[in-house]
Structures are given as C-alpha cells and as structure tokens.
Image (spheres, grey):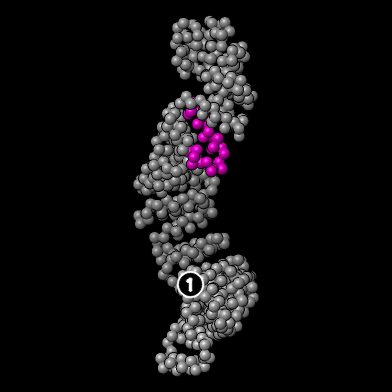
Amino acid sequence: MNSVYSTYRSHRLLIGLASSVGLLLCLADLPAVAQRKRDKADTALAKPGSTSTTTVRMEAETQFTDGIRYLMTDEPSKAITQFAKVLQKDPNNAAAQYSTASAYLKSGKVTEALPFATKAHALDVDNKFYSLLLAELYVKQKRYGEAEDLYEALLKKGPENAEYGVELAAIYLFNEKPDKALEAYNKVERELGLNEEITRQKQRIYLKQNKIDKAIEEAEKLVASEPSDPDYLLEGAELLIANDRADQAISWIDRALKLSSDLPQAHVLLADIYRKKGDMDRVSKELNQVLANPNLEAGLKARILSSYMGMTGSNTAAQQDALVMAQNLAKTSPNDPKTQVMLANLLMQQGKKTEARDAYAKAARLDGSVYEVWGALIQLDGELNQVDSLLVHSEKALEVFPTQGLFWYSNGSANLYKRRYQQAVDALEESQKLLAASSNNELKKGIYAQLGDAYNGLGDHAKSDESYETVLKVDPLNDHVLNNYSYFLSLRKENLPRALQLAQKLVERNPTNATYLDTYAWVLYVSKDYAKAKQYLEKALADPANVSGTIIEHYGDALYQLGQADKALEQWKKAKMKGGASPDIDKKVSSGKM
C-alpha cells in the first residue's frame, strides 16, 4: 500500500517546485519592447522618492528564486525566510504560499505547512500540484476524508490525471475503505492498462477479505500478460499453496514446467506439497532433480536444500534424506563454503558434533570471512574438548575478527589449558576490554575466574586473588572459584581462614564431588587438622570413578601425619600406579617418609 502511494508522491515536490520556477521563467521571457513600455509606465506612476514597481517586482523575483534554490539544496529554513519576504509584499502569491508549505513539509513541520498549502489551493484551485500537496498534508494528519475529496476532484478533471488514482486508492485503504480502493485501482487499470504493482495490491486486499478466488483471478491476469514467463505461474502456485489449495497449485507448477523444465523453485514447491502429503519418495525425487541440475551453482543448491531442511520439522526420515543429499552435494562441490556450512548445520541438528565441527572447519578454510562459521567451529572445539584445535582456530579467527571478545576469550581459555599463562593473560585481558560493555554477566565472570587461574600460574598472586574476589562479590557460590581460590591459598599457606571458609562452602554445595572433597581436605591438612582431612579424603575415595592419583597421595599424607606410616606407604604406592601424583611421590615410596 505505502509503496504504490510513495511511487507517485516522491516526485511531486520537485515537479511542483519546477512549476513555481516556471512562473519566474515566464516573467523573464517577456518581449523586450513590452518590458520597456512597462518600465516607462511604472516610472511615470511612481511617486518622487519611492521605490519603483519594477524594482519591487525584481526584488520579489530574486527572493523567490533564492528561496527555491535553498529548498532544492536542502536548506528549508533559509527558504522559508525568503518566501516570507515575498508574501509580506504579496500575500496572494500562490507560488510562494505553495513553496512555503513545501519548505515546512521538508522540515517535518506538517502543522505549520497546512495554512500555506490551504491558501495556495484557495488562490488557484486548478493547480494540481497545490491540490496534491494539500492532500498529502491531510493524509499526514489522518484527515483522510478531506484528502479523498481533493483526489476525487482531481480525477474528475480528465484522464490525464488517472495515475493519481493509485494515491487515492492508498488513502481509501488508510481510511479502511477496501472496496473503494479496489474501485480506484480498477479505474487506473482501465485508463492506463495492467500494472503489476496494482495487481499485487488488489491481491492483498482480496486475501485480507478472504476472497481467494478473486486473488487468483488477479494472478491469472499477470500470467495472461506474460504467457511465456513461468515466474507468474510459480507466484500463483505459492499463493495457492499458502491458501491450502495444493492440488490446484500442482497444475500451475506443471504449466510452468512446460514452459521451462529447468526451474528449481518449481521442484522445491512440489517437494513441499508432497512432504505435506506424506509422499517422501516424491519429495526426494523432486529435490534430487534440483541438486542434479548442472546449471545451478552449488551455493544456490545449498540454499534450496537448507530451505527444505526447514520444512522437515521433526520428521526423522526426511531429515536423514536431507543429510544424505547434503553429503552428496558436499562431495560433488567440495570447494563451495556454503555447501559445507549447510552440511554442518544439518549435522548439528542431528547431534553429530564431531562431523559438524569438521564441516565448519572446511567451510572456514574455504571462506574465512563469515563470523558465524568461526563462532560455531570454536564452540564445538570447546564442547568436544579439542584444545589444540581451539587454540589454532581461535588464532585464525582473530586474524579476521581482531575485535571480537568471544574469540579472545576462547583463545585465552585454550592457552590457559596448555599452561601458557602469559598468553592466556594477554588474551583474557583483551577479551575483558572488548566485552566490558556486554550484558553477558556469566561470560564476564568466566573471564575473571580464568584470569585468577592464569595470574596464579604466573605467580602474580595479588592479581589472582583480586580476580577471584571480583567473581565472588557477584557470585559467592561460584564452584570454580571456590575450588581453585581455596586450593591455591592452601598451597601458598596464606589466608587459611579464608581458604577454609571457601572450601567448606564448596563441599556443602557438592557433598559427593571427589575433587571438591579433596580440596577441602587439603585445606584442612595445611591447617594441620589431619583427622578431619582424613575424614573428607575417605569421602572422596568413596567415588572410585573420579578418584585421581592426587587424592590417593593426599590420603597417604594425612595417614602419615596421624602416625600411620605403613598405611601411608600403601596409599602412596597406589597413587604412583594410578598416575597424576606429585613429583615427590617416588621419594615417598622409596623412603616411606614425607
């Protein structure tokens, strides 16, 4: 509706202004003899000491010309000032009234423009540009009835104004008069012939009125206007499908295919129809015909297949068929990144993360300019615990997107895991800067938590503690920080009351977690509460699946401090066999002492 209205309206101001300028040109074209006679007459009539009529007229023309120039160079306020000077001398100057209204409209001041447009129209009711401007201002104020009157009067003046029926129809629609809008559109078509945009407008009205047959009649008109063009047939088929007339749509699609058998959209539409009918064999047949088309580039095939994937919903068989098609397309078009992305997306939907990650990685190698591909790839690297790949992929992603905080965060996490602490700190600090304004508080906590770990690895304990405390201020129950912060404090034998407080809170929240029980036990051990440390280590050992060499070694240490050296040696031997114990384990085993 608005698009048709604006098509004609957009040129009105310039045309109207050109008309105003034309008035000046007419004045300039008067014959020289007549001009001299008028100048003599003006001189004779002028009183001594007064400004001549010619001078006044020339000043007005200059001011008006200046106003038009300012208006055309997007300086409406200056234009208004010039037009005001003209109107002060001659309030009945219709062109100046119109131009002032135009300037106010250009400034967005509809209310101020209206009196000038009204005056211009009253002074010259036959000037269509004055009528059109006044009608436009009425529309902006939702005074649709008054705008309708102006357009109706304009259309009655002759067939040369028939095109303005489009704007009248739009106003009827604004005023919720769809039948009158249809009548106006029909009149325009009778005068000017079939117009595609008008036909589509009529279709929208008919569909809103639930007059499907009428909308289809309009589609048939478009087909008849271009009988050798299959596009209108396919558009009509889409209209029929959208209104639950699939069988009728098939006949329209068949008509299109008779005109051209090489129509991918036709086969996609047929695939959708047969999917709804449950005929998946026919669906596969139609889509395979599209994918086998040598004239279609791989990216378009990928988009078509992606569109079909969106249609399958939760149909497992259809999804599997789509996957097979995608895999075949990826094999036949191995260098097309869109195909690889499409395959990766489908693999992700079906929970095949490893294969999806490989497809995303290939897509990124083929075209590294797509942020979403790198994001999906890096996320899967993390979920699959592929740290080496995460490190490599995050570095490559940062070469293309150096200001993306998420990529810096992933790179910092990978470096931290690899114990490359300085690189981890550098990446995480950069991530922290870039994401400072982010509303993702979970991510911000993650950055500070990992900075705490990385600073600790560098031996910068002050910054490590500060980072951990920053997290705990907003999330006092953050298990990662409670565990690492308390454990690192115990290793340093610093601020043990704080370490005990944190570790105790940790095991209260996770009473069966072997790792967290070991942390609390070790803080107790460093605090020389060996009996209680032994108690919590035994709780940790009750979960054999998660027991590490470190936990077993700590249990041996607690036993040794409690005077049970033989039992301690037995546990140290187990820890050595398990693996993951401290570098001192060999000495403990060989000497039987701490």
x and y, in percent, of residue 411 in the image: 44, 35
**What residue lies at 58% left-to-right and 21% top-to-bottom?**
495
Q: Is residue 540 above or below residue 214?
A: above
Residue, disc 1: 70
Q: Is residue 309 above or below residue 590?
A: below
Q: Is residue 281 above or below residue 470?
A: below
**What residue lies at 47% left-to-right and 79% top-to-bottom?**
62
Q: Nearer the viewer, residue 24 or 413?
A: 24
Q: Is residue 382 left or right of residue 132?
A: left
Residue 561 visible to an observer of this rendering: yes
Give the number of callouts: 1
x and y, in percent, of residue 414 in the image: 44, 32
Q: Is residue 17 left or right of residue 474?
A: left
Q: Give the amino acid at mark 1.
A: Tyr
User: Is residue 416 in the magenta section?
Assistant: no
**Image: magenta residue range:** 431-456
Mark 1 burial class by Cα count in 10 Å: few <14, some 14-19, many 20+: some
x and y, in percent, of residue 245 in the image: 55, 62
Q: Which quarter of the image is occupied by the N terminus?
A: bottom right
Residue 15 visible to an observer of this rendering: no
Quadrant of the rendered image containing residue 472: top right
Q: Nearer the viewer, residue 515 or 15?
A: 15
Instruction: Please identify the dominant SS of the magenta region.
Output: helix
User: Is residue 433 in the magenta section?
Assistant: yes
